[in-house]
Image (cartoon, rainbow, N blue to C red):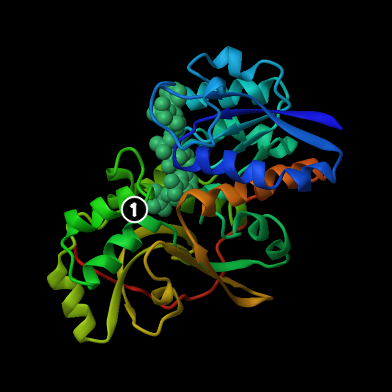
């Protein structure tokens, strides 16, 4: 057996889920002739209480020590600060990186893209957690010209809206989502629509333009922070549901991106994704409509995609490539979605 040395950056909701699943799936790595071993686990505070399966002796705030001799880096820290420097320097040294960090992917793309093209960057967990979208959009769905896509890409806001439909107030629902580990360290990223915008930017680079600008998505983003229960009930009286939807569609001869709360008929496929579930409705010229739905946040749900990427890498597949070249907006008229005034 050869040892596979994994440097793990972060042992929070997703990082601790990764440690647990890695141990449970050890036999699968052995079938590949590999014994996975964590070279270290980078955290801010090694003394903080953690689940019992996280090996305390490996926790450290010394990045150099954690990264030394690693065969692969698994980045589950989040943010565009310290994570950016560590990920970029690992990639510059030719070490593959697996990440769930959509903020980093969206905002530091010029630095990351060359490594994504080299096949060193794996990021299935960054969009819709363990529900596969990055892989199909960087693979089998490439046999299409994309016409439009719409997604519920943020589990926290979908959970909050669902709990408000059950009668909870906004703050109470947010607090519940935080306790379940769905919410980013800065909750504005979720409730302000920024996290969904990060994810939409990643999907745009896989489907329409490898250099789609983060700024262009961010400028057309609004969240649910001002959504009231009254608006949710009024929608229900009209047989509709409010959902935070991230969309990519052609209009006026160019591609548009938008994240905003919309009113959907209650039987719309996207309205069926309940609580922390996510959904993607993709339309391609050849395949027609494709609908993908599943868990969109949480410890094991997200860790499963990180392990999936690790196994994919060990089986010799490259990381997820962006689209090679931008494609012009098609001459296609999408059904408009009804926006909620916020
Ligand atoms: P989290 O619970 O806040 O955990 C973050 C971990 O990173 C903690 O262990 C923290 O250390 C460590 N960390 C953060 N900043 C650090 C720094 N400057 N130096 C050293 N260690 C640092 O976050 P999470 O929910 O697991 O999310 C991790 C990543 O996965 C994020 O990019 C997030 O967007 C993404 N993601 C999350 C979910 C989800 O459902 N939670 C789903 C998909 C993707 P301490 O423990 O010592 O504070
Ligand atoms: N905060 C994110 C969400 C985590 O709620 O969707 C999953 O990416």
In which quadrant will I find the N terminus?
A: top right
Q: Residues within 10 Å of mark 1 (few under 14, many from 20)?
A: some
Residue at image location 54% in from the left, 16% down from the top: 63
Q: Identify the residue under disc 1.
A: 220
Q: Quadrant of residue 262?
A: bottom left
Residue 80: tell me if it is visible. Answer: no
Where is residue 154 shown, x and y percent of the image?
A: 40, 56
Q: Secondary structure at mark 1?
A: loop
Residue at image location 28% in from the left, 51% down from the top: 191
In which quadrant will I find the C terminus?
A: bottom left
Q: Of residues 115 and 65, which is closer to you in this image? A: 65
Answer left or right for 256 relative to 113.
Answer: left
Answer left or right for 114 relative to 293.
Answer: right
Answer left or right for 167 relative to 20.
Answer: left
Where is residue 168 shown, x and y percent of the image?
A: 18, 65
Residue at image location 34% in from the left, 38% down from the top: 185
Q: Is residue 341 above or below residue 324?
A: below
């Amino acid at each position: 057996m050869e040892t596979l040395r994994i440097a793990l950056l972060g042992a929070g909701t997703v990082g601790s889920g990764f440690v647990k699943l890695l141990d449970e799936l050890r036999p699968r790595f052995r079938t590949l002739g590999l014994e996975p071993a964590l070279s270290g686990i980078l955290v801010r505070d090694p003394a903080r209480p953690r689940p019992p399966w996280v090996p305390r002796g490996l926790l450290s705030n010394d990045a150099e020590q954690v990264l030394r001799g690693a065969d692969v880096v698994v980045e589950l820290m989040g943010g565009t600060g310290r994570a950016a420097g560590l990920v970029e320097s690992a990639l510059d040294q030719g070490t593959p990186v697996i990440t769930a960090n959509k903020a980093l992917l969206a905002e530091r793309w010029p630095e990351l893209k060359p490594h994504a093209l080299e096949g060193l960057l794996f990021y299935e967990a960054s969009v819709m957690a363990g529900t596969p979208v990055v892989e199909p959009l960087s693979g089998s769905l490439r046999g299409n010209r994309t016409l439009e896509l719409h997604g519920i890409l943020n589990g926290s806001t979908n959970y909050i809206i669902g709990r408000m439909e059950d009668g909870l107030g906004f703050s109470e629902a947010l607090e519940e989502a935080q306790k379940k580990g769905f919410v980013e360290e800065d909750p504005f990223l979720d409730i302000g629509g920024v996290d969904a915008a990060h994810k939409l930017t990643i999907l745009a680079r896989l489907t329409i333009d490898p250099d789609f600008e983060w700024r262009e998505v961010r400028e057309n983003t609004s969240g649910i922070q001002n959504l009231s229960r009254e608006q949710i009930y009024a929608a229900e009286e009209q047989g509709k549901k409010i959902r935070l939807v991230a969309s990519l569609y052609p209009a006026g001869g160019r591609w548009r991106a938008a994240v905003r709360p919309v009113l959907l008929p209650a039987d719309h496929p996207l309205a069926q994704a309940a609580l922390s579930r996510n959904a993607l409705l993709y339309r391609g010229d050849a395949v027609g409509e494709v609908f993908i739905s599943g868990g969109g946040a949480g410890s094991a749900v997200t860790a499963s995609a990180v392990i999936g990427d690790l196994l994919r890498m060990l089986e010799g597949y490259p990381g997820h490539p962006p689209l090679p070249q931008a494609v012009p907006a098609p001459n296609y008229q999408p059904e408009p979605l009804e926006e909620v005034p916020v």
